[in-house]
Image (cartoon, rainbow, N blue to C red):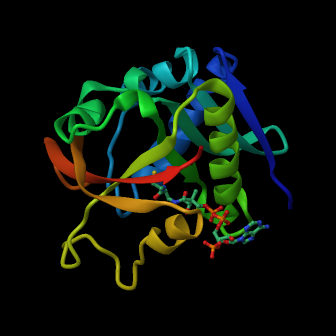
Amino acid sequence: MSLRIETFAHGRAAPLIPALSRLRMAVFRDWPYLYQGTAAEEEEYLAPFIQGPSAALVVAFDGAEPVGCATCMALPEALDEVIAPFLAMGLDPSAYFYFGESVLLPQYRGRGAGVAFFTAREAHALAASSCSYATFCAVRRPEDHPLKPPGAGTLHAFWRHRGYAPVPGLACTMAWTQVGSEVEVANTLDFWRRKIR
Ligand SMILES: CC(C)(COP(=O)(O)OP(=O)(O)OC[C@H]1O[C@@H](n2cnc3c(N)ncnc32)[C@H](O)[C@@H]1OP(=O)(O)O)[C@@H](O)C(=O)NCCC(=O)NCCS
Protein backbone atom coordinates (compact mmCIF):
# COMPACT_ATOMS: atom_id res chain seq x y z
CA MET A 1 0.00 0.00 0.00
CA SER A 2 1.60 3.30 -1.02
CA LEU A 3 1.17 6.52 0.92
CA ARG A 4 0.73 9.94 -0.64
CA ILE A 5 2.79 12.71 1.00
CA GLU A 6 1.54 16.30 0.67
CA THR A 7 2.84 19.58 2.12
CA PHE A 8 0.26 22.14 3.28
CA ALA A 9 1.12 25.80 3.96
CA HIS A 10 -0.74 29.12 4.36
CA GLY A 11 -3.69 27.68 6.30
CA ARG A 12 -4.59 24.99 3.75
CA ALA A 13 -4.46 22.23 6.40
CA ALA A 14 -7.16 23.84 8.59
CA PRO A 15 -9.89 21.29 7.62
CA LEU A 16 -7.54 18.48 8.69
CA ILE A 17 -7.20 19.66 12.31
CA PRO A 18 -9.61 17.12 13.88
CA ALA A 19 -7.99 14.17 12.08
CA LEU A 20 -4.46 15.36 12.86
CA SER A 21 -5.38 15.91 16.53
CA ARG A 22 -6.63 12.32 16.76
CA LEU A 23 -3.44 11.07 15.12
CA ARG A 24 -1.14 12.97 17.48
CA MET A 25 -3.11 11.84 20.53
CA ALA A 26 -3.00 8.18 19.42
CA VAL A 27 0.72 8.11 18.60
CA PHE A 28 2.02 10.26 21.45
CA ARG A 29 0.09 8.27 24.06
CA ASP A 30 2.64 5.51 23.53
CA TRP A 31 6.21 5.32 24.82
CA PRO A 32 8.30 7.46 24.92
CA TYR A 33 5.95 10.51 24.98
CA LEU A 34 3.21 9.13 27.26
CA TYR A 35 1.13 12.18 26.37
CA GLN A 36 -2.48 12.35 27.45
CA GLY A 37 -3.82 15.28 25.45
CA THR A 38 -7.29 16.64 24.77
CA ALA A 39 -8.79 17.77 21.46
CA ALA A 40 -8.84 21.37 22.74
CA GLU A 41 -5.12 21.28 23.65
CA GLU A 42 -4.35 19.76 20.26
CA GLU A 43 -6.21 22.46 18.37
CA GLU A 44 -4.34 25.18 20.26
CA TYR A 45 -1.01 23.41 19.67
CA LEU A 46 -1.55 22.84 15.94
CA ALA A 47 -2.93 26.31 15.09
CA PRO A 48 0.48 28.04 14.65
CA PHE A 49 1.70 25.18 12.43
CA ILE A 50 -1.32 25.77 10.20
CA GLN A 51 -1.57 29.56 10.20
CA GLY A 52 2.06 30.64 10.89
CA PRO A 53 3.65 32.64 8.05
CA SER A 54 6.59 30.22 7.57
CA ALA A 55 4.88 27.06 8.84
CA ALA A 56 3.97 23.89 7.00
CA LEU A 57 2.29 20.61 7.75
CA VAL A 58 3.33 17.49 5.86
CA VAL A 59 0.61 14.86 5.78
CA ALA A 60 0.76 11.16 4.80
CA PHE A 61 -2.49 9.89 3.29
CA ASP A 62 -3.72 6.36 2.78
CA GLY A 63 -6.39 7.15 0.20
CA ALA A 64 -8.29 10.10 1.68
CA GLU A 65 -7.35 9.19 5.27
CA PRO A 66 -4.50 11.06 7.04
CA VAL A 67 -2.35 8.39 8.74
CA GLY A 68 0.65 10.52 9.68
CA CYS A 69 1.87 14.11 9.81
CA ALA A 70 4.90 16.26 10.49
CA THR A 71 5.11 19.94 11.38
CA CYS A 72 7.62 22.75 10.92
CA MET A 73 8.08 26.52 11.25
CA ALA A 74 10.87 29.07 11.54
CA LEU A 75 12.20 28.89 15.11
CA PRO A 76 11.46 32.59 15.92
CA GLU A 77 7.75 31.78 15.43
CA ALA A 78 7.85 28.86 17.91
CA LEU A 79 6.89 28.85 21.59
CA ASP A 80 9.09 30.84 24.00
CA GLU A 81 10.19 27.67 25.82
CA VAL A 82 11.55 26.29 22.54
CA ILE A 83 13.45 29.49 21.65
CA ALA A 84 14.83 30.20 25.16
CA PRO A 85 17.60 27.54 25.22
CA PHE A 86 18.98 28.80 21.89
CA LEU A 87 19.20 32.35 23.26
CA ALA A 88 20.77 31.04 26.49
CA MET A 89 23.50 29.31 24.45
CA GLY A 90 24.13 32.38 22.29
CA LEU A 91 22.66 30.72 19.16
CA ASP A 92 20.73 32.95 16.73
CA PRO A 93 17.11 31.63 16.50
CA SER A 94 16.71 33.13 13.02
CA ALA A 95 19.30 30.63 11.70
CA TYR A 96 17.06 27.69 12.66
CA PHE A 97 13.97 26.09 11.14
CA TYR A 98 12.13 24.10 13.81
CA PHE A 99 10.56 20.69 13.14
CA GLY A 100 7.77 20.14 15.68
CA GLU A 101 7.18 16.42 15.35
CA SER A 102 6.57 13.41 13.10
CA VAL A 103 3.79 10.96 13.88
CA LEU A 104 2.74 7.93 11.88
CA LEU A 105 0.31 5.19 12.85
CA PRO A 106 2.33 2.06 13.75
CA GLN A 107 0.98 -0.09 10.90
CA TYR A 108 2.41 2.33 8.29
CA ARG A 109 5.97 2.51 9.68
CA GLY A 110 9.09 1.20 7.94
CA ARG A 111 7.95 2.13 4.39
CA GLY A 112 9.66 5.48 3.94
CA ALA A 113 7.08 7.98 5.22
CA GLY A 114 9.37 9.10 8.08
CA VAL A 115 12.18 9.76 5.57
CA ALA A 116 9.70 11.63 3.34
CA PHE A 117 8.63 13.83 6.30
CA PHE A 118 12.25 14.98 6.72
CA THR A 119 12.79 15.49 2.97
CA ALA A 120 9.58 17.52 2.60
CA ARG A 121 10.24 19.67 5.68
CA GLU A 122 13.84 20.37 4.64
CA ALA A 123 12.61 21.36 1.16
CA HIS A 124 10.04 23.68 2.75
CA ALA A 125 12.66 25.20 5.10
CA LEU A 126 14.96 25.94 2.15
CA ALA A 127 12.13 27.48 0.12
CA ALA A 128 10.46 29.45 2.94
CA SER A 129 13.51 30.76 4.82
CA SER A 130 17.20 31.54 4.66
CA CYS A 131 17.89 29.30 7.69
CA SER A 132 21.19 27.45 7.93
CA TYR A 133 19.94 24.65 10.18
CA ALA A 134 16.95 22.39 10.69
CA THR A 135 16.37 21.43 14.31
CA PHE A 136 14.00 19.33 16.40
CA CYS A 137 13.85 18.10 19.98
CA ALA A 138 13.17 14.66 21.40
CA VAL A 139 12.05 13.66 24.88
CA ARG A 140 14.80 12.40 27.20
CA ARG A 141 13.83 9.18 29.03
CA PRO A 142 15.98 7.26 31.54
CA GLU A 143 16.77 3.62 30.69
CA ASP A 144 15.07 2.51 33.93
CA HIS A 145 11.82 4.49 33.42
CA PRO A 146 8.99 2.42 34.98
CA LEU A 147 6.78 2.73 31.86
CA LYS A 148 9.46 1.75 29.31
CA PRO A 149 8.21 -1.32 27.39
CA PRO A 150 10.67 -4.23 27.29
CA GLY A 151 12.93 -4.00 24.24
CA ALA A 152 11.84 -0.44 23.30
CA GLY A 153 14.49 1.25 21.17
CA THR A 154 15.11 4.88 20.22
CA LEU A 155 14.99 6.77 16.92
CA HIS A 156 18.61 7.97 17.37
CA ALA A 157 19.98 5.85 14.50
CA PHE A 158 17.09 6.94 12.23
CA TRP A 159 17.86 10.61 12.94
CA ARG A 160 21.63 10.15 12.50
CA HIS A 161 20.95 8.48 9.14
CA ARG A 162 19.07 11.63 8.12
CA GLY A 163 22.20 13.69 8.95
CA TYR A 164 21.12 15.02 12.36
CA ALA A 165 23.22 15.05 15.55
CA PRO A 166 22.43 16.11 19.12
CA VAL A 167 23.63 19.56 20.21
CA PRO A 168 25.35 19.00 23.57
CA GLY A 169 23.73 21.04 26.34
CA LEU A 170 20.83 22.33 24.20
CA ALA A 171 17.53 21.19 25.76
CA CYS A 172 14.12 22.60 26.62
CA THR A 173 11.40 21.77 29.11
CA MET A 174 7.79 21.05 28.17
CA ALA A 175 5.03 19.98 30.53
CA TRP A 176 2.16 17.66 29.64
CA THR A 177 -0.33 15.44 31.39
CA GLN A 178 1.34 12.06 31.34
CA VAL A 179 -0.26 8.63 31.07
CA GLY A 180 -0.77 7.36 34.61
CA SER A 181 -0.72 10.83 36.19
CA GLU A 182 -3.47 13.37 36.76
CA VAL A 183 -1.15 16.38 36.76
CA GLU A 184 1.21 17.94 34.24
CA VAL A 185 4.76 16.57 34.40
CA ALA A 186 7.79 18.61 33.25
CA ASN A 187 9.81 16.74 30.60
CA THR A 188 13.27 17.52 29.23
CA LEU A 189 13.70 17.40 25.44
CA ASP A 190 17.12 17.38 23.75
CA PHE A 191 17.73 19.28 20.49
CA TRP A 192 19.23 17.76 17.37
CA ARG A 193 20.22 19.71 14.28
CA ARG A 194 21.49 19.42 10.71
CA LYS A 195 23.10 22.07 8.51
CA ILE A 196 20.80 22.53 5.48
CA ARG A 197 22.69 25.33 3.67
C1 LIG B 1 9.27 8.77 13.47
C2 LIG B 1 8.38 7.96 12.56
C3 LIG B 1 7.38 8.91 11.90
C4 LIG B 1 9.27 7.32 11.48
O1 LIG B 1 8.40 6.68 10.57
P1 LIG B 1 8.74 5.51 9.53
O2 LIG B 1 7.80 5.70 8.41
O3 LIG B 1 8.81 4.21 10.21
O4 LIG B 1 10.20 5.84 8.98
P2 LIG B 1 10.77 5.32 7.58
O5 LIG B 1 10.06 4.09 7.14
O6 LIG B 1 10.79 6.45 6.61
O7 LIG B 1 12.26 5.03 7.97
C5 LIG B 1 12.60 3.96 8.84
C6 LIG B 1 13.69 3.15 8.17
O8 LIG B 1 13.14 2.39 7.10
C7 LIG B 1 13.84 2.68 5.89
N1 LIG B 1 12.87 2.54 4.77
C8 LIG B 1 12.03 1.48 4.64
N2 LIG B 1 11.33 1.59 3.51
C9 LIG B 1 11.68 2.73 2.90
C10 LIG B 1 11.28 3.37 1.70
N3 LIG B 1 10.37 2.85 0.89
N4 LIG B 1 11.83 4.58 1.39
C11 LIG B 1 12.74 5.13 2.21
N5 LIG B 1 13.16 4.54 3.37
C12 LIG B 1 12.65 3.35 3.70
C13 LIG B 1 14.42 4.07 6.11
O9 LIG B 1 15.55 4.26 5.29
C14 LIG B 1 14.79 4.00 7.59
O10 LIG B 1 15.99 3.32 7.82
P3 LIG B 1 17.38 4.09 8.05
O11 LIG B 1 17.23 5.02 9.23
O12 LIG B 1 18.33 2.99 8.33
O13 LIG B 1 17.69 4.86 6.80
C15 LIG B 1 7.64 6.85 13.34
O14 LIG B 1 8.60 5.98 13.90
C16 LIG B 1 6.74 7.35 14.47
O15 LIG B 1 5.63 7.83 14.24
N6 LIG B 1 7.20 7.23 15.75
C17 LIG B 1 6.41 7.60 16.92
C18 LIG B 1 6.39 9.11 17.14
C19 LIG B 1 7.76 9.67 17.41
O16 LIG B 1 8.48 9.23 18.30
N7 LIG B 1 8.12 10.67 16.60
C20 LIG B 1 9.44 11.28 16.65
C21 LIG B 1 9.52 12.35 17.64
S1 LIG B 1 8.39 13.66 17.37
Question: Can see residue 182?
Answer: no
Image coords of residue 28 (percent x, y): 42, 51
Whether residue 111 is visible: yes
Q: Quadrant of the N terminus?
A: bottom right
- Identity of the residue drawn at 50% across and 44% down: 134
The residue shown at (33%, 48%) is: 35
Instruction: From the viewer's perspective, tell me whether residue 29 is left or right of residue 101.
Output: left
Residue 173, position in %: x, y?
Answer: 20, 43
Whereabouts is ligand 1, in terms of quadrant?
bottom right
Say which residue appears at 35% left-offset and 62% top-offset. 32
Most foreground residue, 139 or 179: 139
Looking at the image, residue 36 sits to the left or right of residue 15; the answer is: left
Say above or below: 68 vs 72: below
Residue 126, placed above or below residue 102:
above
Percent coordinates x, y for residue 43 in the rendering: 45, 23
The C terminus sits in image quarter: top right
Residue in the picture at 64% in, 15% down: 11
What x and y, as percent, mark residue 132? 51, 39
Work out whether 28 lies above or below 87. Answer: below
**What count of labels does the image hold?**
0
The residue lying toward the viewer, choosing from 59 and 163, is: 163
Q: Quadrant location of residue 16?
A: top right
